[in-house]
Image (cartoon, helix red, strand yellow):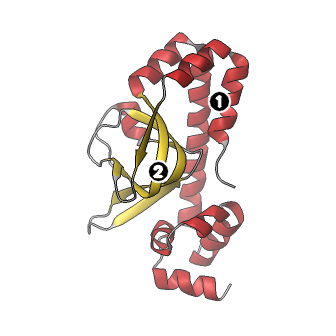
Amino acid sequence: MENDIVSQKLELLRKKDEQAFNEFSDAFETGSCKKGEILIPMYKTCDRLYVVESGIAKQFRHKEDGSEYITWFSFKGDLLTAFTSFVTQEPSKEAIKIIEDCEYISISRDKCYALAEKYHAVETFFRELMEVYYIQSDERLFFLQSFTAKQKYDHILKEMPHFSQRLPQKELSSFLGITRETLSRIRKYP
């Protein structure tokens, strides 16, 4: 199942403070990107927070040899931003590229912070989302560094089946840190 944490947290925000929810919801703008477009460029400061409505985006960095190191994928319902840049307002060390036509809603960082200052419920909403983001990042780091290639793929099948169903093999193998040939062998001989 794809992520629905953002919608769950928004529903909690609505229940806690309807006025805060309405003002927060009204601050979002709609947008879209086509496959292959860069949503957040590397080395630019990220000043928006996105929620994916449809499509898929990937977050990546470059290795010293110039190849991509994929750090995460975002699907429908996922929060999407260059988190460190968004918080620190320093140039991003990662980029976000669209790998399947994408529609999203977004809100500016300034509006996020202003609403968090105005409404305690909005501040709580952001804190809880950041906690989830941190936990997922911590789990992802352990998974990528501790598991064998086979264990990584089995984990994907069990915990994130939409990854194996919707991602191109090239993207999935890059994320797992294995070659496409290794991924093909793992898929062929489970």
Residue depicted at x 54% and y 64%: 144
Quadrant position of residue 97? bottom left
Q: Quadrant where the C terminus lies?
A: bottom right
**Crowding near pointer 2: few (<14 within 10 Å), some, many (20+)?**
many
Whole-number angstrom distance, CA of label 1 to CA of label 2? 21 Å
Residue 10 numbered tag: 1
User: Does dot 2 land on a helix, a strand or a loop?
Assistant: strand
Quadrant position of residue 127? top right
Residue depicted at x 54% and y 80%: 183
- Identity, as a three-letter code, of the amino acid under mark 1: Leu
Residue 47 numbered tag: none
Counting labels gives 2
- Identity, as a three-letter code, of the amino acid under mark 2: Cys
Q: Quadrant where the N terminus lies?
A: bottom right
Residue depicted at x 58% and y 20%: 122
Residue pointed to by mark 2: 102
Q: Position of residue 102 (x, y in %)?
A: 47, 50
Q: Position of residue 181 (x, y in %)?
A: 48, 85
